[in-house]
Image (spheres, rainbow, N blue to C red):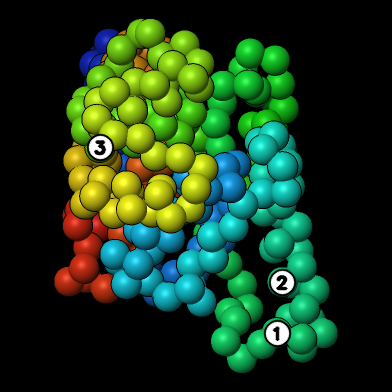
Amino acid sequence: MTENLPWWKAKELSLKRKAAAALRPSCACAGDSFLIVTEGAVTEPVYFELLRESLQLSTVTVKVMPGKASDPRHVIQSAADEVKNLTYRVRRKKVAVTELEKFDHVWAVIDTDVAIRQGFWNDVVQKARDLKVNLAHSTPCFEYWLLLHLKMTTRGDLVNGDAAKSAFRNEWGSDYSTNREITEQAFRNLLPAWPTAVGNAQQVRQHYASANTPSPANPSTDVDLIVCALNDSAPPHLRKVPCRET
């Protein structure tokens, strides 16, 4: 027990625990249901639909939808509104037989780029807490998560979303676009590397935790948390990374 340890040893143990906690992904159980609301209208929805498909998760248990606007605050509000709407319909027995009656996990997939530059990031975090929506945020944007499928990097020149998108395109060696069919074709080739991206994201998180870098560090991502949760909810033989112990 830490109370019987010298203060310096207890502090060292506490720091190690915090670093270890930073590596542990969000936990889910097999069969859990998810609501995933994204900031992007094409890139993120296509990615998560393909991930859902690869894990053989049902469209009933995993609902992916874009938010009403690209502002992360609107994405969070869209998620909360969807939960509220479902609750309303359940109470009035207006839920279809193919629908679930609740979401076990509610996520907003957002970028931090604009929110940090315009000074409202703290408002985003507080809104998510108030509305009980989990944040899977990427700094500066979702393309950093995509880049981690290809390599581990904490390069310091990803100063904004455009820089991160350019870095991913250059590393990937081909383009993807706002056209859904083109994006889907590109991501079918990229998606099998998601376990690599998870490992890289956790390594990045450990790097910043060891350096005591304030969140959100640039570049960084928490998208691995929701990806690991989806993995944990899949049938055991389809999981690609070890399921987090509860």
Look at the image and tell me whether residue 134 can be seen: no
Tell me the quadrant of the picture where the N terminus can be found: top left
| Structural crowding at the residue carrying mark 3, measured as other residues with C-alpha within 10 Å and reported as few (<14), some (14–19) or many (≥20) | many
Identify residue type, mark 1: Val
Residue at 29% x, 64% y is 54
State if disc 1 and disc 2 touch (CB < 8 Å).
yes
Closer to us: 225 or 209: 225
SS at circle 3: loop
Distance, label 2 to label 1, CA atoms, is: 8 Å
Residue at x-position 54% and y-position 60%: 64
Marks 3 and 2, how far apart in space?
35 Å
- Specify the amino acid type for callout 2: Leu
Note whether 217 is above or below 129 in the view shown: above
Q: Which residue is drawn at 75% across and 57% down?
A: 81
Left or right, residue 237 beside residue 49: left
Mark carried by residue 95: 1
Instruction: Tell me which numbered mark, 2 or 1, is placed earlier along the sequence.
Output: 2
Per the rendering, the mark at residue 86 is 2
Q: Is residue 137 left or right of residue 77?
A: left
Say which element carries label 2.
helix
Q: Mark 3 points at which residue?
A: 149
Q: How far apart are marks 1 and 3 (CA)?
A: 38 Å
Mark 1 and mark 3 in contact? Answer it, CB < 8 Å. Answer: no
Q: Which of marks 3 and 2 is in front?
A: 3
Residue ranking furthest to the bottom: 97
